Image (cartoon, rainbow, N blue to C red):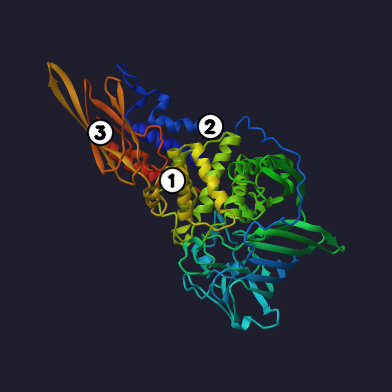
């Protein structure tokens, strides 16, 4: 799911505040005295490093051309051989009652026991029940809000299971009960336990038939309706993941089961989906996978047939207003894909921008990480007011932001390339987003930035983004353990991206590209964990990263290196007056080797030193013909995990009371500023 610092003025003011606070604490960096040595030019000063980024255009004048295309004839047919373990197989039919915003579904599920022990019960995610009342776990944790979008007052939804039977006709609903393993909330019915009449032996398959209905809510949090627009995400009874021993570090095999929480997204097994969607004749349907035959239309109802293999979810959307555009595309690294746009009519004129962004993303990600193996990618543009369905990813189907603006800025492209990035990290690598959301969201945010810079010339403002991290938490933790959505997004999107960028800064872009490619290639279709990524980093770099991961991944640290004091003492030497400047540097956060420090003298000269930062503090003593007049730690912002730039600079003769007042005032201003930054 896409999340971002969304208010342009907030971005600008934050950068300005960071820059001007540094300048004001220092005195005037722009009025450096001339003299011996090479003074830092303005464009390289600590304040200017941030200020320079304010001049970056929101919409660059030019963008890179598309990667060279090759003739494309994508074949929409089943994969010649399995790409995944295919634990599940779903055959479903669903009818849309457009008048009452209701789905009537039938499901035949075949599940294979992948473990080494008999399994006596199954667990099903009934995600629509998150919207059944204000008392569900999702609604209580989210407060009925997600990314600035609010649930409509009085609009509820839910799923009802009408029957669940084995092939021999045994009724399983009489053996079923709702369970709440995470919080014990009896009002939450998003997880169902079904006790079986007899265990499923290792390697054996079980087939169940289920009839169900879904009442759609007004579109919110990835599903629902807006007028005649339908978004059916997480709409069917989905079996949970049974993990064999060794999967994601498990000592013993068992079910991975969680309720639907305010922050969490999803985790499921790979398999095959064959789905028929019946809608009124005037509707067009977009869905995961590809059509197996043209829709059958009897003049009143239209039935679409879709098929998808090696995916772990199936979503669809329907509207009588979609403007449909399709183009094939292939490159040297992309075998061939049909890109399908389902546009809101108000964005029909923007079809080239949507299509170009999709092509750039598919081509670049396939080049950097590995080929997109599916024959189709569908892009749904929700109507104005439909952002509850916007900015979301499903296998081979994504949604853009809703068509709110006639002439949107680069957020149009940014959201698309973010969601297409999810096709790789969520869709194929498929980590457990309940427990390790950073492995999807952080990796996708990192890839998004890389593509936006390569293709659109837009560089991320990393010093500003790092300064936003006011509540760092471990990246590997349960999604609902973060204190609200802001803290969740701050960590699993932004801080996670900065951790990856920090690794890149330390090993270089080429080796980082090898790390990401090795991780993708080794773990696609296999549900990796954080420890698996660490092993890839260590194997690729031939170095140990345990300390780094303990602090910044398994721990919730950022770096904070502070200039904590400057003391100048005059010395007489051979009739000359020299100055011994003692500078106290402290480490207030995590360790981070190679901390660059610039010492500037009153005569305009300067010197630089590098501190390894292994101890808690260090005193640098410099003897020179002039006293030190200011000190700057990491003036070029090479350390992207530093989130308190405001104490990284000190001027020798600044009024300490004035400096303290500005420090406290600026921090308060930042807190206020970010109060109206939406995620």
**How many angstroms separate mark 2 from mark 3 (CA)?**
34 Å
| Image position of 360 with respect to 255: above or below | above
Residue drawn at point x = 65 percent, y = 40 percent = 360
Q: Nearer the viewer, residue 627 or 500?
A: 500
Residue drawn at point x = 54 percent, y = 54 percent = 147
Q: Which mark is residue 347?
A: none
Residue 285 visible here? no
Q: Secondary structure at mark 2?
A: loop
Q: Position of residue 350 (x, y in %)?
A: 71, 41
Is tag 1's residue or tag 2's residue first in the polypeptide sequence? Answer: 2
- Category of crowding for the residue at label 1, using alpha-carbon neighbours closer than 10 angstroms: few (below 14), some (14–19), many (at least 20): many
Residues at badges 1 and 2 in contact (C-beta under 8 Å)? no
Q: Which residue is mark 3?
A: 655
Q: Which residue is mark 2?
A: 56
**How many angstroms separate mark 1 from mark 2 (CA)?**
20 Å
Residue 578 falls left or right of residue 489? left
**How many angstroms separate mark 3 from mark 1 (CA)?**
28 Å
Q: Position of residue 460 (x, y in %)?
A: 51, 38
Q: Secondary structure at mark 3?
A: loop
- Category of crowding for the residue at label 3, using alpha-carbon neighbours closer than 10 angstroms: few (below 14), some (14–19), many (at least 20): few
Residue drawn at point x = 65 percent, y = 65 percent = 235
Q: Which residue is mark 1?
A: 468
Is tag 3's residue or tag 1's residue first in the polypeptide sequence? Answer: 1
């Amino acid at each position: 799911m896409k999340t971002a610092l969304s208010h342009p003025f907030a971005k600008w003011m934050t950068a300005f505040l960071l820059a001007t606070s540094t300048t004001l604490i220092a005195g005037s960096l722009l009025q450096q005295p001339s003299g011996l040595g090479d003074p830092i030019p303005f464009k390289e000063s600590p304040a200017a490093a941030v200020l320079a980024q304010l001049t970056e255009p929101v919409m660059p004048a030019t963008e890179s051309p598309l990667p060279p295309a090759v003739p494309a004839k994508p074949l929409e047919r089943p994969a010649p051989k399995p790409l995944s373990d295919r634990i599940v197989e779903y055959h479903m039919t669903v009818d849309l009652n457009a008048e009452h915003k209701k789905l009537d579904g039938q499901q035949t599920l075949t599940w294979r026991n992948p473990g080494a022990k008999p399994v006596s019960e199954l667990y099903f995610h009934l995600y629509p029940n998150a919207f059944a009342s204000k008392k569900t776990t999702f609604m209580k944790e989210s407060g009925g809000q997600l990314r600035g979008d609010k649930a409509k007052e009085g609009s509820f939804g839910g799923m009802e299971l009408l029957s669940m039977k084995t092939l021999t006709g045994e009724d399983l609903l009489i053996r079923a009960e709702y369970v709440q393993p995470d919080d014990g909330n009896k009002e939450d019915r998003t997880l169902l336990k079904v006790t079986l009449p007899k265990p499923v032996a290792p390697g054996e398959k079980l087939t169940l038939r289920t009839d169900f209905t879904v009442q759609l809510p007004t579109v919110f949090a990835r599903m629902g309706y807006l007028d005649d627009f339908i978004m059916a995400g997480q709409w069917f009874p989905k079996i949970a993941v049974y993990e064999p021993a060794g999967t994601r570090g498990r000592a013993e095999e068992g079910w991975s089961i969680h309720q639907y929480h305010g922050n969490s997204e999803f985790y499921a097994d790979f398999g095959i989906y064959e789905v028929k969607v019946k809608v009124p004749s005037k509707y067009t349907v977009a869905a995961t996978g590809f059509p197996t035959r043209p829709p059958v239309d009897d003049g009143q109802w239209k039935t679409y047939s879709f098929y998808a293999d090696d995916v772990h979810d199936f979503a669809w959307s329907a509207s009588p207003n979609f403007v449909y555009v399709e183009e094939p595309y292939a490159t040297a690294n992309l075998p061939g894909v049909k890109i399908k746009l389902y546009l809101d009519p108000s964005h029909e004129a923007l079809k080239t921008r949507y299509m170009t962004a999709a092509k750039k993303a598919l081509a670049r990600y396939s080049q950097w990480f590995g080929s997109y193996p599916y024959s189709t990618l569908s892009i749904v543009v929700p109507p104005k007011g439909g952002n509850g369905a916007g900015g979301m990813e499903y296998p081979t189907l994504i949604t853009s932001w809703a068509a709110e603006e006639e002439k949107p800025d680069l957020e149009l492209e940014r959201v698309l390339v973010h969601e297409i990035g999810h096709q790789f990290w969520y869709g194929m690598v498929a980590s457990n987003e309940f427990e390790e959301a950073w492995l999807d969201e952080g990796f996708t945010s990192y890839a998004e930035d890389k593509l936006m810079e390569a293709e659109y010339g837009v560089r991320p403002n990393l010093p500003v983004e790092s300064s936003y991290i006011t509540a760092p938490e471990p990246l590997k933790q349960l999604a609902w353990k973060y204190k609200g959505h802001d803290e969740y997004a701050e960590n699993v999107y932004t801080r996670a991206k900065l951790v990856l960028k920090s690794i890149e800064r330390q090993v270089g872009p080429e080796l980082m590209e090898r790390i990401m490619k090795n991780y993708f290639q080794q773990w696609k279709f296999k549900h990796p964990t954080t420890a698996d990524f660490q092993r890839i980093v260590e194997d690729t770099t031939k170095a140990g990263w345990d300390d780094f991961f303990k602090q910044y991944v398994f721990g919730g640290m950022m770096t904070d290196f502070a200039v904590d004091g400057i003391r100048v003492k005059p010395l007489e030497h051979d009739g000359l007056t020299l100055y011994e400047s003692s500078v106290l540097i402290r480490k207030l956060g995590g360790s981070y080797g190679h901390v660059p420090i610039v010492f500037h003298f009153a005569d305009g000269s300067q010197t630089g030193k590098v501190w390894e930062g292994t101890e808690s503090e260090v005193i640098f003593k410099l003897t020179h013909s002039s006293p030190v007049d200011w000190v700057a730690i990491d003036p070029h912002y090479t350390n992207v995990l530093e989130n308190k730039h405001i104490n990284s600079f000190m001027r020798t003769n600044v009024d300490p009371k004035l400096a303290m007042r500005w420090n406290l005032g600026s921090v308060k201003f930042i807190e206020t500023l970010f109060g109206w930054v939406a995620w």
